[in-house]
Amino acid sequence: MKQKARMSSSTKLKTPSSRYQSLVENLPVGVLIINKNNGIDYANPHAVEMLGIKPEDYENLKPVQFLHPSYNHEFDLLIKGIKNESSPGFIELKVQRLDRPKVLEVEASGGMLNDGSVQLMLHDISTRKQLAREQLRAQIAEETNLQLQREIIERNKAEKDLLQAQKYARSIIDSSLDMIVATDIDYNINEFNAAAESTFGYTKEEVLGKNISVLFSDEGEMAKVLKKINEQGSLANEIINKKKDGTFFISFLSASVLRNEHGEAVGAMGVSRDITAIKKAEEELRLSEERHRAIYDQAYIGIARIAKMGRFLLVNERLCDMLDYSADELYKKTFYELGVQEEVEESLVDWDQLLSGKIKNFSREQTYVRKDGAILSANVTVSLVRDSNNNPNYFVAVFEDITERKEYEKQLEESIKEKEVLLKEVHHRVKNNMQVISSILNLQSSYITDENALGIIRESQDRIKSMSFVHESLYQSKTLSEVNFAEYIQNITRNLYHSYGRPEGGIELEFDLDNIYLNLDTSIPCGLIINEVVSNSLKYAFEGRDSGKIRVEFKKKSDEKMKLIISDDGIGLPKDFDIENAESLGLQLVTTLVTQVSGKLDIDVTNGTSFNIEFKEQ
């Protein structure tokens, strides 16, 4: 993250005074940051365009490269004044473009930044100077017009000379880019140049002899102008004019009283320029800044602009409230100072990946220490803003306060743990109750001599045990909601094997089981199915034989269905066997349980007996 940024037209600002980066980059004023070694670290787009800076000029760029040699002394005075904080104000300089031989006139001012750098602002006043020269020409025209009026009043000059002077004055007035209007002593219009015709929408013939009031928005506006001219002899101010079509516009008026050679007032002349577009742009810029700042500060989440080195460049009010710091206090801190050290070190990988372009943003939960010492848990989303050359510029971080949510989650986890303990106890007690029932049946069997009745009781005990195993598996499971069914199959099958007293090495048990977990609603009917089929095999499949094989397969198919196959290589069922009409209670139970799990049963008696069941978890 500690990369040194190259200077470009969008290089990030480094000081709190330049926190509004987007505004600075779009200012029609050149902004330079000069470091302690008199090198330039930053130039905004307007400065790059103004000075004609090319990419190859960026390395070791210094003010002397574009400063006009005759203004070295003034520039040194400006820099010394800024560093001494003696408020040097605006100083006029001349600079020369680096890409072509052109000299610009600029006003320069600046201030010190926190890191000792100088922030310099250059305002191109070449146009204004040109305007001043044009105004000078207008003044010359005014003086010429005065001279013409003197000639008319005195009538002591030849008509030929007077006509030539009038033509000369007209050419100057009509070539002016500014509106030029003159009046007699009663403020009736006697001069109206081409620029005035274009702006006001009147022809010269339409306004000659009319009172100047037709050009003002109202009588009050005109009265203010005439009062100032009469009292001070001149005026330079913004006024509101009215066009022929009734629309208003703002102009900057420079006006003065016209006097004859005796110093007597004979009229007035004004030079003005339409500045409506400039005023509108200024107002839109102000409103845009206020609107975006309001949205930024009133956001419910904390928002910060962070430099590549981690220092806060801009923060909103919500983030200040979250961290209990003022904005000025945060500008003196880095993003890393406020976090928990271990978490900060873990997050550095994400920051590096952002800088390298491997990820566009990242989000993680972080813990921060507020000014008052309280702990703040926040979900932080960070993204990287790049400049026009795709170089890393600054980070934007969004903070969501999740302190209350984390506390609620903690309470919820504790509540879940309590409920898990209770649920385990429920499963444990259900299992114990089933074992009690099994024990009661076992005691009852000691009083029964009928072999068929004993067989029924033992089958009932096996069914109870198969359900008991399910609750025991849930009791031992970490999730308390799912049974490791592969493990369950082996337990119930081996229990039946020993229950029917098969000798070791006689009947072989074989398993091919996927590691599948089933919920309670599916586990119990499946367990009973396995109990009935395996019991049936152990009782009848190997009559008269001491050896054989029982195989259980449990697989998960690609369509999310389960496949359970229980087979043996015993004597098998009759080829015309119909399980739907079987008299055995166990086999009838199998069909009922298969239906319960919405399964499909297929019995294969080709080689022994194989029960093939497909079903989905309930």
Image: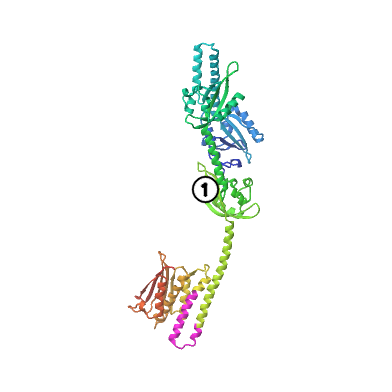
Q: Quadrant of residue 31?
A: top right
Q: Give percent across and percent down for residue 49.
A: 52, 34
Marker count (numbered): 1
Residue 153 or residue 597, whichever sits in front: 153
| Residue 464 is a magenta residue | yes
Name the magenta segment's main secondary structure.
helix
- Number of residues whose C-alpha sits closer than 10 Å to that of mark 1, classed few (under 14), some (14–19) or many (20 or more): few
Q: Give percent across and percent down for residue 444.
A: 49, 85
Q: In the rendered image, is residue 26 in sight?
A: no
Position of 340 compared to 451: left or right? right
Residue at the image point whose x is 50% and y is 73% from the top: 471
Q: Give percent across and percent down for residue 383.
A: 53, 48
Q: For the C terminus, give its image quadrant.
A: bottom left
Residue 615 or residue 238, whichever sits in front: 238
Task: Name the element at disc 1.
Answer: helix
Residue at the image point whose x is 51% and y is 16% from the top: 165
Provide the residue designation for mark 1. Answer: 356
Q: Quadrant of residue 365?
A: bottom right
Q: Amino acid at mark 1?
A: Ser
Q: Give percent across and percent down for residue 249.
A: 51, 32
Residue at the image point whose x is 43% and y is 85% from the top: 452
Q: Which residues are magenta?
A: 441-469
| Residue 434 is a magenta residue | no
494 up-or-down from 53: above or below: below
484 up-or-down from 147: above or below: below
Q: In the rendered image, is residue 314 in sight?
A: yes
